[in-house]
């Protein structure tokens, strides 16, 4: 989400230190400068510096997901974006500060290379700690785009036979940039099987066209449709698809027929 021109990661820690020295507390410029440091850290994949900008018990509240806390939440959320090669750009709409508390409202764009893959809005609350430095205490944002895939048609699948264990099937067809890269994500330890299993998918089978290796697909037995849909439409799900090279506008979701 938050982007400026790239500089070397070593300089980011110096930016944060200087931001918390001047201008004096109560001046919105200090949060503008901290936002620059945030953007730089995200877009140069400096996760440790990004983590430093948050309180140790900060709440991270991504769309379609649970509240995450502190450094682990920052790493899980924004580390996934970095791993997927996503960058961001923000525009500040409002900053208000009073007695060690502040809030910032703005808009964001998420980019994969030069392509904008998501736009939305965010609000952050900031506090000063015992050391006098400003840090983010709450960070929440949501997309301008509707969640996908549509929920209502898929809910009806709960009553179908599926895999014989009461699990309905979903088929997802898509093209990928590199079939070997996509297949590698589904192999070995910590594969996409683990991610899908943790989000309502009982079993996943991968498929590939013999005529066009980059035409690929999944057949998924779903035991928790709501969890599965939330994962697909979450930042984590979109980041995973981008990391695996899935061509977003080629995706087709098919539901098991009655």
Image: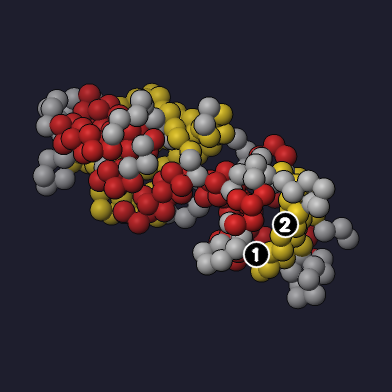
Q: Is residue 40 left or right of residue 61?
A: left
Q: Secondary structure at mark 2?
A: strand
Q: Position of residue 7 (x, y in %)?
A: 30, 30
Q: Which residue is mark 2?
A: 218
Q: Which of the two residues, 46 or 147, is positioned nearer the viewer here? A: 46
Residue at the farthest right position? 258
- In the image, residue 55 sits, relative to residue 111, either above or below, namely below
Figure quadrant of residue 184: bottom right
Residue at image position (44%, 32%) is: 88
Image mark count: 2
Residue at image position (75%, 54%) is: 208
Q: Which residue is mark 1?
A: 201
Of the 4 image quadrants, the one containing the C terminus is bottom right
Residue 103 visible to the viewer: no
Q: Position of residue 8 (x, y in %)?
A: 28, 34
Residue at image position (18%, 35%) is: 14
CA gap between label 1 and label 2 equals 11 Å
Q: Position of residue 91 (x, y in %)?
A: 40, 24
Q: Position of residue 137 (x, y in %)?
A: 29, 45
Q: Is residue 34 left or right of residue 17?
A: right
């Amino acid at each position: 989400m938050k982007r400026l021109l790239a500089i070397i990661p070593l300089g980011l820690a110096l930016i944060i230190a200087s931001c918390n020295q001047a201008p004096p507390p109560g001046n919105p410029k200090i949060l503008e400068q901290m936002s620059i440091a945030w953007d730089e850290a995200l877009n140069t994949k400096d996760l440790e510096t990004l983590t430093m900008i948050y309180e140790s018990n900060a709440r991270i509240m991504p769309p379609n997901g649970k509240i995450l806390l502190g450094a682990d939440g920052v790493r899980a959320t924004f580390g996934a974006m970095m791993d997927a090669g996503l960058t961001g750009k923000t525009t500040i709409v409002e900053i208000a500060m009073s007695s060690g508390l502040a809030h910032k409202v703005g808009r964001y764009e998420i980019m994969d290379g030069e392509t904008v893959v998501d736009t939305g809005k965010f609000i952050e609350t900031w506090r000063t700690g015992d050391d006098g430095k400003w840090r983010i205490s709450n960070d929440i944002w949501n997309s301008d785009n509707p969640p996908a895939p549509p929920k209502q048609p898929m809910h009806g699948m709960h009553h179908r036979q599926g895999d014989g264990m009461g699990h309905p099937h979903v088929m997802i067809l898509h093209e990928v940039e590199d079939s070997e890269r996509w297949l590698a994500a589904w192999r070995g330890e910590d594969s996409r099987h683990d991610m899908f299993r943790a989000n309502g998918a009982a079993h996943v089978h991968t498929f590939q066209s013999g005529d066009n290796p980059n035409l690929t697909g999944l057949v998924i037995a779903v035991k928790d449709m709501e969890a599965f849909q939330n994962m697909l439409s979450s930042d984590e799900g979109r980041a995973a698809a981008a990391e695996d090279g899935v061509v977003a506008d080629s995706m087709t979701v098919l539901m098991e027929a009655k």
